[in-house]
Image (cartoon, grey):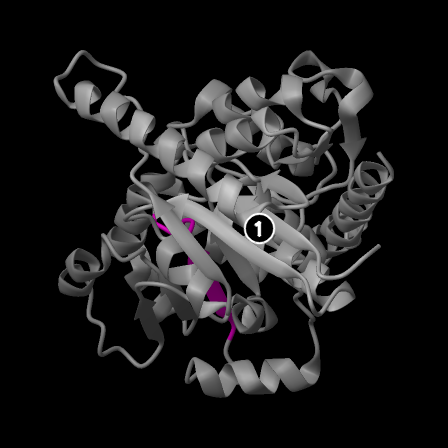
Amino acid sequence: MMNPLKILISGGGTGGHIFPALSIADEIRRRYPKAEILFVGARGRMEMERVPAAGYKIVGLPVSGIQRRITLKNFKVVADLIRSLLMARKLVREFQPSLAIGVGGYASGPVLRSAARKGIPTLLQEQNSYAGVTNKLLAAKASVICVAYSGMEKYFPEDKLVLTGNPVRPIKISEELRADALTHFNLQSEKPVVLIVGGSLGARTLNNAMAAHVSLLLDAGIQVVWQTGKYYYDEMSVRVDTSHPLLHVLPFIARMDLAYNVADVMISRAGAISISEICLTGTASILVPSPNVAEDHQTKNALALVKENAAVLISDKEAGEKLVTAALELLADKERCASLRKNSLRLAQPDATAQIVDEVEKIVERSSKR
């Protein structure tokens, strides 16, 4: 393959789209240090901060989701979509990528549509067991569609599917990193740790459950590392005693690799990337699927682990009453924790990122021979 390679990566909105995209970019750059990689995201969304922080350039489009109810805001959404299509067309023409990659999210649509119309090959990466609207619309023109679950032919052309798993951040579990994590989070080595992560933006159900009952954990001598999400941080900081030495409340955890190294039990939503990271790290987890997602796909994600005895599932409705108690019970059951860790590790797909970039190479090689 000739250098320099030029790759356009589009998508975002949540960490579930952004972190896989960054993992793919990092692997491309590892293989091809001279590769030129440009991200395209949605203005005002978290990718506009996270991607530059990871060392990549990003361009923002004024694109957003359509409102499900009848509202005048949808006129602006449509106008912004038209502007985004025009901007994406200009961007593709000027950047002239070898390949465009879409990871889902609002910005993927205009960018990959524009790339496909210019004859540029495209690759889609679908993280969930239920395909997102953007990826379904883009599938017909895609060269390859990388998926994390079997049975995705009900959403996509079967001949384009490649089962790779989800690309995740490289996370190692080691005694050395555990020591670093204890210092980073100001934790005591002899006390157990519960990690609460409601996705990159936070989850009100998990936050409310913790605010109401976190004292049960603290009174039991359990340390709590709690990512609230930036939208909930101020509220949660008022509702709990953040000066408690065992309680560590954060708006966002940038070093999730360190968080996994100290978590005896993790409480999490059941987004696809969270599931993949839990398996990769062999973390004992309690999953609370979000009810506010298409086709209830987070419950399907969680059940894939539960049926293998690799996680505990608590419904969103039951979380307020049962979540903290379940964490206490799991921490007390060392044998079950060990079983969850072992079984989740068995479900890991550690080579997903490499397999996706293998597909990138194949597509670019085929294109260069035409």
User: What stretch of residues is rendered in magenta?
Assistant: 192-202
- Dividing the picture into quarters, in which one does residue 203 lie? top left
Q: Position of residue 11 (x, y in %)?
A: 48, 41
Q: Position of residue 120 (x, y in %)?
A: 65, 34
Q: Secondary structure at mark 1?
A: helix
Residue 349 visible in the snapshot: no
Residue at (51% x, 30% y) in the render: 114
Eyeballing the image, is 82 above or below 38?
Answer: above
- Dividing the picture into quarters, in which one does residue 174 lie? bottom right
Nearer to us in this view, 341 or 300: 300
Label 1 sits on residue: 21
Label 1, residues with CA under 10 Å away: few <14, some 14-19, many ≥20:
many
- Circle 1: residue type: Ala
Residue 197 in magenta?
yes
Residue at (12% x, 18% y) in the render: 72
- Dividing the picture into quarters, in which one does residue 19 lie? bottom right
